[in-house]
Image (cartoon, rainbow, N blue to C red):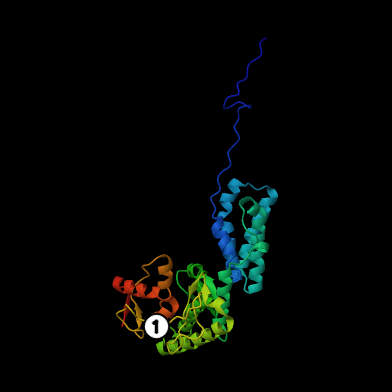
Amino acid sequence: MARRRRFGGMFGRRGAAKPKPIKTNVDTKGLKRLYTWLPFDEPFVLRLITDWWAASAFHLQRSYPLDAAGKKSLDRASKAAILGGGASTRPEKVHAFQTSVRLYEKLWASSIGAPLLESAEPAKGVVGLSDAARMVESGTNYEFGITKADSEELTGATIRIPVKWLESAAGQPPATAALHFATVLAQVQATRGDEMDFAEFIKLLESKQSQIVAWIKSSGSTLRTGRGVPVTPVTPTGQTPTGTSSAAGRKRAPVSTGGLPFPLTASITLKGKNPFKGSRGAMFDRIVDGMTVQTFLALSGSPGKRLLVRAKAKGVIDIQ
């Protein structure tokens, strides 16, 4: 009897094609950036990292399926994150979120080239921002943290700065960041209920600016420059402090109103939402309702002149 011939077609054993791996669509670049923010606000950033892993778990399981032990680890990671979210103290939050992140890392970090908590290195600019924030908050009952929101938030005794602003400010001189922190802190301290005492705001801001100038003088040029960008803090009298210079060592004069149709003492009133994006959007976010042109230019430098003119033309601010 003749043997039946088998064909190795699409449905035959010999011709069966191996299933192609499903492409993983996860933003590891964003995850790596989060790890660099750990020195600034460890509990909050650990939570952001945990959120990233939890949101990516579905896609990762499709590309890198888990065995029974892996699924148990994934369940433990989820439960640890829940414990961290419900913890009432900082050490409890840090421990719970670290446990969750390490479990996620053990499951998939090597497969996707993700960083590890033990080897994560903070970005140089972020360390400078941490130093600037701690200097500004010293002697007060407030501390700085991070928020996902588009504007600053006051949660208890913590002033939370938007992540978007911190990302743009990381490449700026710590002194520039300190001036912005000082403005936010002064605004919060001068606010009673829904109203801000403008006279108290100016008084607090000038006090902090003087503190920043002294900090710059005692700490050297590294606080004044970042990526070759000079910064000129303004003292309460509006004069440039001696010793403040550009990266090349040239002395800079105080920011003038050259090209502006309003004086340094004019007040800025917010009338609309931020219409700008990128670095201009981050610069516009530094405007505090009622601040003077002089204070804003101390935070933004010469580029702030063009932004004020454009913002006024767009009708989102008024200057009088």
Does 81 sit above or below residue 70? below
Q: Residue furthest top?
A: 1
| Quarter of the image with the N terminus in it | top right
Q: Nearer the viewer, residue 40 or 158?
A: 40
Number of marks present in the image shown: 1
**What amino acid is found at the position of numbered circle 1 in the picture?**
Gln
> Is 153 positioned to the left or the right of 5 in the image?
left
Residue 135 position, x and y percent, is 57, 81
Residue 51 position, x and y percent, is 57, 61
- The residue that label 1 is drawn on is 294
Residue 51 visible to an observer of this rendering: no
| Quarter of the image with the C terminus in it | bottom left
Residue 42, quarter of the rendered image? bottom right
Crowding at mark 1 (Cα within 10 Å: few <14, some 14-19, many 20+): many
Residue 2, quarter of the rendered image? top right
Q: Nearer the viewer, residue 300 or 226?
A: 226
Q: Residue furthest right?
A: 69
Residue 104 position, x and y percent, is 64, 57
Q: Which of 290 and 206 is in front in this view?
A: 206
Residue 310, quarter of the rendered image? bottom left
Residue 21 position, x and y percent, is 58, 42
Q: Nearer the viewer, residue 199 or 307?
A: 307
Residue 244 visible to an observer of this rendering: yes
Identified at 30% across, 70% down, the residue is 314
Does 126 sit above or below residue 109? below
Does 42 sit above or below residue 239? above
Identified at 67% across, 60% down, the residue is 102
